[in-house]
Amino acid sequence: MATESLSVDTATRPSRPRRVSATTERPAVKWTLIAIAVLFLVAVLLLPLFTVFIQAFVKGPGVFFAALSDPDGAAAVRLTLLVAVIAVPLNLVFGVCAAWAIAKFEFHGKAFLITLIDLPFSVSPVISGLIYVLLFGANSVLWPFLQSANLQIVFAVPGIVLATIFVTFPFVARELIPLMQDQGSGDEEAAISLGASGWQTFWHVTLPNIRWGLLYGVLLCNARAMGEFGAVSVISGHIRGFTNTMPLHIEILYDSYNFAGAFAMASLLALLALLTLVLKTFLEFRFGAELAATRRH
Amino acid sequence: MPTGVSRGGWQFAKPSVIPGFGLTLGLSITYLTLIVLIPLAGLAFKSASLGAGEFWRLATDERTLDALWTSFGSSLIAALVNVVFGLLVAWVLVRYSFPFRRLLDAVVDLPFALPTAVAGISLSALYAPNGWIGGPLGHLGIKVAYTPSGIVIALIFIGLPFVVRTVQPVLEELEQEIEEAAATLGATRFQTITQVILPRLTPAILTGFALALARAVGEYGSVIFIAANIPYKSEIAPLLIVIRLQEYNEPAAAAIGMVMLVIAFAMLLVINLLQAWSRRRFGGN
């Protein structure tokens, strides 16, 4: 009897209003929402990306390669690489140091320190350049000293490097801090108590635990370092062939109505952005558990 | 690195067997001070040395106020658009499965990775009167590039991932049980969404809004290519700083910079308070 009533019960179920589940929307609503979201993403994000590559090749590959082999263009590519090669490792070392101190130890003022590390993210890129112009420029207190030491910082490569370091300052640290806090310090304490030195513990215990998070932070840091425009623009002085990074060279080409050249240079940076996204997505997909729990940047 | 335990004089830290505290904290604080704190303090010092009267005169100059108004007005509109569409995108990405979902999910981060100058020239090519989007809009009588609405377009591009990436994880962790409970108690799907799900998302939405707004106010690279940059009309505050610097008018640049810095820090404070509030209300996220 019991089984009979049960079967009757299930048999009546489909005759209720046709809803797949109480916790989702009707297919019509669902597909409308998907269509709006996809259209929005295509219009706002994908179209600008495609435009870069199409505009780069619209005048043919000859113009494309001419723009890149132009001496000023080549100098811009070299300077961008140089700046990234200096700025990224410095911020990497800082990020590891800061994360080690913050994640492995308990001390007062830790939350405040983390806030200070995040500070550059809330500063406008233009202000990031401005502060170095005020500090090292012709009207600064340090100017007579810099003159006598024959040190050129503003309108020169050191200024560009400093501004880039500032804007990319938090990337590695803010990826590593939550990651290492989650991992705790049990592994390190075990290694130390078994007689490992501090260096050995770091190289053989900590580093393997944080390598993917570290790579993730470096990836984002590098993308920003190579693409930074506002901060670098303020401090560079735009001297062609000398203090022009790739983004600044794009601006010069664009303002002189050399659109094909500007987009050729831009397509290189867009390629870098795509590569960054692919690697980042791969890391999240493959090593998601070994990255910081927070996905916010 | 010294192999010994170097927590010697550090009274404020808990003892630990792990070495390197003094070294790593010392290096971090030195680097932080040199790169971030001293330069930022320099801006405050420069502004203070102007004197209150002069600072006030420079900061409330008509062109400065118009530039700040342009920056904030367009950032506010862009952040509101991003809240609506960011919420929709996050919802669709979390709740539905459809072709290319993973690809679109990855693409959301594009504005984080694409240099702002590249975004700027690309958006202005798209929305120019002869562009793919600007052309059809022109036939409808709508001009986007080289008008104030161009600024909003660039800021929507820049701010979108902030809203999506703040709302998405909260939405993922929302228990389906509470929706089932709501449905069992007789709520329609619309009531469940507006009265059960949306309140839970509110802190994340507000945080995403504030992050997008903060980023948009300071944005420079993507905006200057698509805006006409006409003083008093479509000139953003960061651009005015650049112009003042090119005129060798450092006091004016410093004054505008200081105003923007104070506003940025106020926003940071609001964001932190929002996150603390959301943690208190809904537990850790």
Image: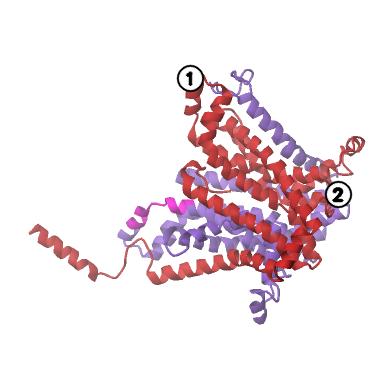
State the SS at label 2.
helix
- In the figure, the shade used to draw chain B is purple
Quadrant housing residue B192: bottom left
- Residue A38 image position (x, y, % from top left): 51, 67
Left or right position of A102 against A70? left
Report the residue at 72% width, 58% height from top: B221
Q: Residue B147, how many percent across, how many down?
A: 72, 70
Look at discs 1 and 2 and give the one toward the viewer. 1
The part of the chain drawn in magenta is: B169-181
Q: Nearer the viewer, residue B9 or A265?
A: A265
**Element marked by disc 1:** loop
In the rendered structure, does residue B175 fall within the stretch colored magenta?
Answer: yes
- Residue at (69, 56) in percent of width and height: B217
User: For mark 1, does the 10 Å Cα neighbourhood hold few (<14), some (14 to 19), or many (20 or more) residues?
Assistant: few
Q: How is the image coloured?
A: by chain
* Residue A47 marker: none
Give the quadrant of residue B135.
Answer: bottom right
Identify the disc placed on residue B250.
2
Residue A231 in view, yes or no? no
Look at label 2 and name its amino acid.
Glu
Magenta stretch: helix, strand or loop mostly = helix
Vertical order, B61 against A235 (above or below):
below
- State the image coordinates of residue B156 (x, y, percent, origin top left): 62, 62
Q: Is residue A175 above or below residue B127?
A: above
Residue corresponding to mark 1: A194
Q: CA distance from mark 1 to mark 2?
A: 59 Å
Towards the viewer: A213 or B237: A213
Residue drawn at x 49%, y 41% is A290
Q: Residue furthest left?
A: A1
Circles 1 and 2: CB atoms closer than 8 Å:
no
Q: Chain A appears in which tint?
A: red
